[in-house]
C-alpha cells in the first residue's frame, strides 16, 4: 500500500504550501523588522536631512508606506495562493484520506499521537489565519482590528510549526524513517 504522504498530489501540494508559507513569513519578518514603516520613515527622514531637506514625519511615513505597499501586495497575493492550496489540500485529504492517523486512534504511541495533534492544530490554525485575513479584507469594518490582531498572532504558531516539523523530519531521517526526505521529494526511498 502506498503511503499517502508520498503520493504525487500530496508531495506537490506539500512543497507548494511550504514555499508559499516561507514567502509569507519572509514578508512578515521584513515588515516587522528593518522594513517596518517607522524604521523606513526614519531612514527617509535621515536621508533627506543629509541633503538639507526637511520633511514632516507624516510625509516620510507616507513615503515609507508607498515603498512598502508593493511588497505587502505580494504578501496578500501569496495569502490567496495559500488559501487555494489549503482548499486543494483539504480536497486531497477528503479523497485520499489523511496523511497522518487520527490523534484519537486507539493504541497509538505517544509520539505518533503528538505528531498527529501537531498536524491537526496546524491545519486548524492555518484555517483561522486564512479566514481572519479574508475577514480583514472583506468583512465588516467593526471586526477589522480584532481580525488583524488574530491574524498577526498566527506568526507564533507558524514559527512553532516550522521548528517542530523540521525537528520531526530530521529526527525521522536520522532515526527510524531513513529516506523520508528523499521520499518527500521523489516519492521513492533512496536505493
Image: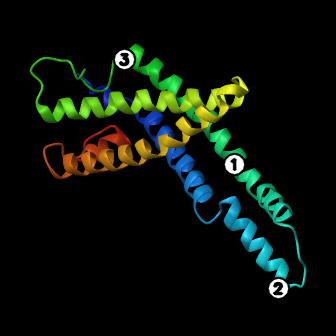
The label nearer to you, 1 versus 2, is 2
Specify the farthest residue to the right. 53
Q: Position of residue 47 (x, y in %)?
A: 80, 79
Q: Position of residue 158 (x, y in %)?
A: 43, 44
Crowdedness near tag 3: few (<14), some (14–19) or many (≥20) residues, C-alpha within 10 Å: some
Sequence order check, earlier mark of 1 and 2: 2
Foreground residue among 153 and 115: 153
Residue that appears at 48% across and 40% down = 154
Q: Position of residue 190 (x, y in %)?
A: 25, 47
Q: Which residue is mark 3?
A: 96
Q: CA distance from mark 1 to mark 3?
A: 35 Å
Q: Position of residue 133 (x, y in %)?
A: 61, 32
**Is 63 left or right of 101, judged from the image as shown?**
right
Crowdedness near tag 1: few (<14), some (14–19) or many (≥20) residues, C-alpha within 10 Å: some
The label nearer to you, 1 versus 3, is 1
Sequence order check, earlier mark of 1 and 3: 1
Q: Which residue is mark 2?
A: 50
Element type where label 2 sits in the image: helix
Element type where label 3 sits in the image: helix
Amino acid at each position: 500500500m502506498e503511503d499517502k504522504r508520498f503520493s504525487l498530489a500530496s508531495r506537490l501540494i506539500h512543497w507548494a504550501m511550504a514555499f508559499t508559507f516561507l514567502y509569507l513569513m519572509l514578508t512578515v519578518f521584513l515588515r516587522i523588522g528593518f522594513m517596518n514603516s517607522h524604521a523606513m520613515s526614519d531612514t527617509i527622514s535621515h536621508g533627506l536631512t543629509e541633503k538639507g531637506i526637511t520633511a514632516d514625519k507624516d510625509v516620510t511615513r507616507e513615503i515609507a508606506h508607498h515603498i512598502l505597499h508593493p511588497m505587502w501586495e505580494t504578501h496578500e497575493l501569496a495569502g490567496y495562493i495559500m488559501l487555494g492550496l489549503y482548499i486543494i489540500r483539504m480536497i486531497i485529504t477528503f479523497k485520499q484520506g489523511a496523511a497522518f492517523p487520527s490523534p484519537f486512534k486507539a493504541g497509538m504511541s505517544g509520539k505518533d499521537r503528538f505528531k498527529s495533534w501537531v498536524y491537526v492544530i496546524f491545519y486548524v490554525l492555518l484555517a483561522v489565519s486564512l479566514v481572519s485575513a479574508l475577514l480583514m479584507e472583506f468583512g465588516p469594518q467593526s471586526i477589522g482590528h480584532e481580525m488583524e490582531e488574530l491574524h498577526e498572532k498566527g506568526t507564533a504558531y507558524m514559527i512553532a510549526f516550522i521548528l517542530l516539523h523540521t525537528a520531526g523530519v530530521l529526527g525521522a531521517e536520522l532515526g527510524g524513517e531513513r529516506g523520508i526526505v528523499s521520499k518527500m521529494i521523489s516519492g521513492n526511498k533512496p536505493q
